[in-house]
Amino acid sequence: MRLPGSVLQQPVFTVDGWIGNSVDEDGVEWWITKEEGWSSSPSVRLSLTDRPERDGAFDAPSYRSARVITLEGTALAPDRLRKERAKDRLAAVLNDGSRLQPMVVTEPHVTRRSLVRLSAESKVLDKKAGVFEFSLQVTAPDPLRYSAELRTATCPLATSSGGLTFPLRFPLDFGAGSSGGRLTLENAGSAATWPTWKISGPCADPVIVNSQTGEELAFAIRLAAGEVLVVDTDARTVLLQGLASRRSALLPGSRWFPLVRGGTTVAFRSASYEAAARLTAEWRDAWS
């Protein structure tokens, strides 16, 4: 008999307290025998318009649909009582349909997650004593798979040091150049990911610049000490203290930009130097 918490095989699926391909606290073995929608890419939405009286169609961008994940398997319980409790446990998974919850998938090479909700009835088929087959279907509105680890990086505004100090003393020291004001953010996945920026005051008219493309997010706002401007590039929101919208502070010509596969370097500027000002990036590596 395997011990509770034992991994039966990978990948291991964890959602709302239920763990597939593992042994639960009752000693029930949850074997996933078929998985669809996690390892494969989500379906593609392509809307092409036929060219009238000509071959082919007018080109148009394609988009990924929501990711639908179906898990089918067999549960092996030590006895009838624990089998019935296991069926109740499965029926309770994602029972709260009002919010998305993380499904964490532990694979041999990486641990990733998606935010999901139940999208079909959970099915149970009784077999012999202590055994039943089951299926669980969930849907992730965001089709990307993200690293389970939330990555963060922080930098201050750039400071310039150098020049001459009088009275002169030899040997002359012309300074060490500039420091701060720059972040290099790595996205180890295969798809672009949208970060959340947090600008901590005091700071006047902050600007976040993609150094590779020149795209920038510029804000006409003065942040006092202790105030934080939260910029969610995926949701396209700008919130002061995470609550009050300051979307109107985003200057015309600003461009939302993601972190592409590999590394993205960003610069942090403002109208004046404040030693306590900080730019913090939060992101997850993303895979299609």
Image (cartoon, rainbow, N blue to C red):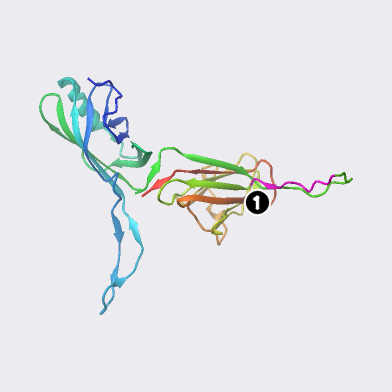
Res 63 → quadrant: bottom left
Q: Position of residue 76 (x, y in %)?
A: 18, 26
Is 173 included in the stretch rendered in magenta?
yes
Quadrant occupied by the N terminus: top left
In the rendered image, residue 106 lying in the magenta stretch gets the answer: no
Q: In this orientation, does residue 61 appear?
A: yes
Find numbered disc 1 in the image and state the secondary structure of the residue it sits on: loop
Q: What's the magenta region?
A: 171-180
> Left or right: 115 with respect to 28?
right
Say if 257 sits above or below 15 in the image: below
Identify the residue shown where x is 50% and y is 49%.
263
| Relative to 52, 241 lies left or right | right
Query: Between 256 and 99, which is closer to the camera in this rendering?
Result: 256
Image-based side of 167 in relation to 277, left or right: right
Looking at the image, which is closer to me, 246 or 102? 102
- In this picture, is 18 found above or below 47? above
The answer to whether residue 233 is visible is no
Taking depth in this image into account, of 97 and 163 the one nearest to the observer is: 163
Q: Nearer the viewer, residue 27 or 123?
A: 27
**Residue furthest right as drawn:** 167
Tally the numbered discs. 1
Measuring from the top left, give residue 195's x and y in whole percent. 48, 47
- Disc 1 residue type? Ser
Residue at 37% from the left image edge and 48% from the top image edge: 144
Residue where numbered disc 1 is placed: 270
Q: Position of residue 274 (x, y in %)?
A: 69, 45
Q: Residue at x 57, y 51 (%)?
A: 266
Q: Position of residue 27 (x, y in %)?
A: 24, 21
